[in-house]
Image (tube, grey):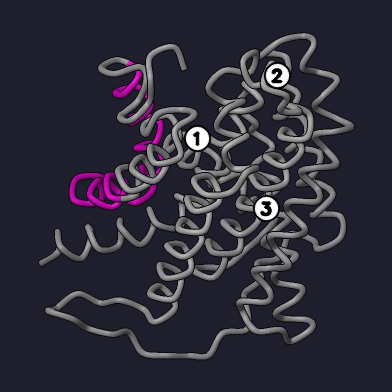
Amino acid sequence: MEILQLIANGVMAGSILAVPAIGLTAMYAVLRFPNFAIASHATAGAFAGWTANALFGLPILPSLLVALLVGGLIGLVTDEFVLKPFRKAGFITTAIGSLALTIGLENVVRLFYGNDLRGYDLPLARDIVVAGIHVGPQQLHNIAISVAIMALVFGFLTFTRMGKAMRAVADNPQLADIKGIDARTVGRIVSFMGMGLAGIGGMLIGLDSSIDPMTGFRAMLPIFAAAVVGGLGSVPGAVVGALVVGIAEELSLLALPASYKSSIAFLAILVILTLRPQGILGREGN
């Protein structure tokens, strides 16, 4: 029964992790670098959602929309004015620049909100027990929200003109340019979407526990691991990778103290890069 409870916890954690992981892998597919600033954008989105919910009294769904918009707008502006100039210097320089950006943005959040833990304005409710497995009502809401967001993203990429343009630029930028697709516009859209998803992910993490200025930074390794395990550049892979990392982290509690839980994401990266460098659903060359 303990194993089933841990697997259920892992599925719930993985479904939350999948939202920012999709954002990270989508940005990597189009912009060709791992944007580690996703951590600070998750924090910014979490605090924007907290401001809307706890200070202005908005319900959770409108607050999530605020988290999306704030995370997306900050992502659009920082990519345009901070990270874009780094791209001429190459992949590694831009990735390092994104790490510096995430440290800077987290300190901006700390300047305005301080270091205290903060919780959302949620009603108290008893856990639901099904076949001996305990599940919190908010956890069920978080899974439903995550699944709905994933369905919207897949629908956007599959059925809309801009979604198809994103996939074309990700597959072959030169051919997309010949076909008249504006890669700069696609880059701006994917920056907004990717960091908006990070903002939502940050708030979902906060709904499951609490938030502070390090919320995004603590989640950065599992998010990156989810994208790498699933296959960098693969949106379905990010979902699979997030579930694998989430369940593996929870099952590790059978043998390891909880303080070692975060090391599982790092171990997952090492294992996948050794056995299948392109990830579970990734393609060789990514």
Q: As rendered, which of 268 and 187 lies closer to the eye?
A: 187
How far apart marks 1 and 3 lie (CA) works out to: 16 Å
Q: As rendered, which of 155 and 228 lies closer to the eye?
A: 155
Do the residues under discs 1 and 3 have CB atoms within 8 angstroms?
no
What kind of secondary structure does the magenta stretch mostly adopt?
Answer: helix
How far apart marks 2 and 1 lie (CA) works out to: 29 Å
Vertical relation: 278 (above or below) 49: above
Please name which of the two marks, 2 or 1, marks the residue nearer to the observer.
2
Tell me residue 6's x, y (percent): 23, 59
Q: Earlier in the sequence, mark 3 or mark 2?
A: 2
* Circle 3 crowding by C-alpha within 10 Å: few under 14, some 14–19, many from 20: many
Label 2 sits on a secondary structure element that is: helix
Q: Earlier in the sequence, mark 1 or mark 3?
A: 3
Name the residue carrying label 3: 196
How far apart marks 3 and 2 lie (CA) works out to: 26 Å
Name the residue carrying label 1: 224
Answer with the quarter of the image where residue 65 lies.
Answer: bottom right
Q: Is residue 204 left or right of residue 283?
A: right
Q: Earlier in the sequence, mark 2 or mark 1?
A: 2
Residue 252: say if magenta: yes
Vertical relation: 154 (above or below) 4: above
Q: Quadrant of the N terminus?
A: bottom left
Answer with the quarter of the image where residue 61 lies.
Answer: bottom right
Q: Residue at x 70, y 71 (%)?
A: 50
Mark 1 residue type: Phe
Tell me residue 136's x, y (percent): 36, 79
Q: Where are the magenta residues, as a range? A: 247-273
* Circle 2 crowding by C-alpha within 10 Å: few under 14, some 14–19, many from 20: few
Tell me residue 286's x, y (percent): 47, 17
Residue 100: say if magenta: no
Q: Residue at x 39, y 41 (%)?
A: 236
